[in-house]
Amino acid sequence: MSTCVFIQLRCKPGTTYEVANEIVLRELHSELYSTSGNYDLLLKLYVDENDDVGKFVNDNLLDIPNIERSLTTLTFKAF
């Protein structure tokens, strides 16, 4: 079983496509969208229930250059 996690990313100005391309290359996500508002990208991914979500995000995503800030939303039940 896995946990569905949504992550919003704010990128340094002018680097959103570079960040998105690096995420695509890492094949971490289920879905990836560019967005308007306070964050530039919205990422949906699944983390194995035995993995620590925070460590997974830090080790596999937040080391990508030009990410300024992230907001992670954990999910519980899908309706």
Image (cartoon, grey):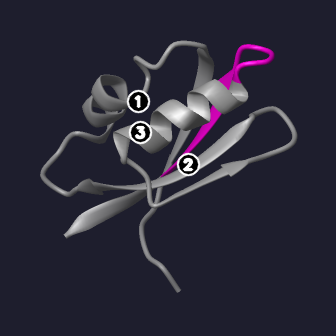
Disc 2: CA contacts within 10 A as few (<14), some (14-19) or many (>=20): some
Q: Circle 2 sits in a helix, a strand or a loop, which is it?
A: strand
> From the viewer's perspective, is 57 left or right of 49?
right
Q: Position of residue 58 (x, y in %)?
A: 35, 24
Query: Tag 3: residue type?
Result: Leu
Q: Position of residue 43 (x, y in %)?
A: 55, 48
Residue at numbered disc 1: 61
Foreground disc of the pair 2, 3: 3
Specify the label residue 43 is tagged with: 2
Which residue corresponds to the image point at 46% horizontal and 20% vertical from the top-left? 64
Q: Residue 69: which quarter of the image?
A: top right
> From the viewer's perspective, is 9 left or right of 31?
right
Q: Earlier in the sequence, mark 2 or mark 1?
A: 2
> In the rendered structure, does residue 36 fall within the stretch colored magenta?
no
Q: Earlier in the sequence, mark 1 or mark 3?
A: 3
Q: Circle 3 sits in a helix, a strand or a loop, which is it?
A: helix
Q: Position of residue 14 (x, y in %)?
A: 79, 18
- The relative height of residue 60 versus residue 7 in the rendered view (above or below) is above
Which residue corresponds to the image point at 19% horizontal and 57% vertical from the top-left? 49
Which residue in the rendered view is the most extreme toward the left? 50
Q: Position of residue 9 (x, y in %)?
A: 63, 32
Residue at numbered disc 3: 25
